[in-house]
Amino acid sequence: MQLTSVEISKPADSNVIVGQTHFIKTVEDVYEALVQAVPGIKFGLAFCEASGPCLIRRTGTDPALEQSAVEAARAIGAGHVFVVILGNAFPVNVLNQIKSVSEVCTVFCATANPLRVIVAEEGGGRGVVGVIDGSSPKGVESAGDQADRHAMLRRFGYKQ
């Protein structure tokens, strides 16, 4: 078995969600979940088919984000993995809707950070082992850091 770290490139100011599912119907169902969650959402979605023609299935509301999702899915290259690249929404706006899609087995990450996906390859197939999301901690937050975090959440409208 060979382990590889795959860097996921995405447009600036976008977020990425990487998960695993089990059925080709995922493409349409995740699309519907996203457009129902956030009116006017901009996103791209790609899904790595694991049997039959083994194509990267794709859809979205923004061609550039769709292409970015296809490139990320191609780089990962693991069966039944899906990639969503979000343009004008945050994962917190859509994550529960994605997780409630009956075909979705797991979500590996939802982030705007630099992202690397750890892929295992063996016997002609690939699978996601895990992800490296962003950077390691540099310390523990102070009272001032806590105040900044509280203010940021209120500025974004997530808390009152």
Image (cartoon, rainbow, N blue to C red):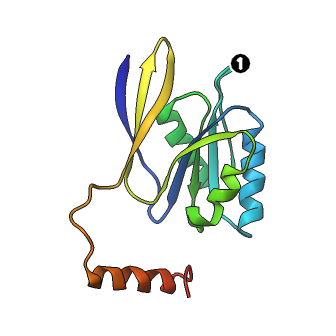
**Left or right of residue 66, residue 78 in this image:** left
| Residue 3: x %, y % from top left | 35, 25
Q: Residue at x 73, y 51 (%)?
A: 31
| Residue 36: x %, y % from top left | 78, 63
| Residue 134: x %, y % from top left | 34, 55
How many residues crowd mark 1 within 10 Å: few (<14), some (14–19), many (20+)? few
What is the quadrant of residue 117 in the picture? top left
Q: Quadrant of the C terminus?
A: bottom right
Amino acid under disc 1: Gly
Q: Is residue 133 above or below residue 150?
A: above
Q: Which residue appears farthest toward the top when viewing the image?
A: 123
| Residue 114: x %, y % from top left | 37, 54
Q: Residue at x 38, y 16 (%)?
A: 1
**Left or right of residue 58, residue 7 in this image:** left
Q: Residue at x 72, y 49 (%)?
A: 30
**Residue labelled with disc 1:** 52
Q: Nearer the viewer, residue 25 or 149?
A: 149
Q: Residue at x 64, y 24 (%)?
A: 50
Q: Secondary structure at mark 1?
A: loop
**In this orientation, does residue 125 appear?**
yes
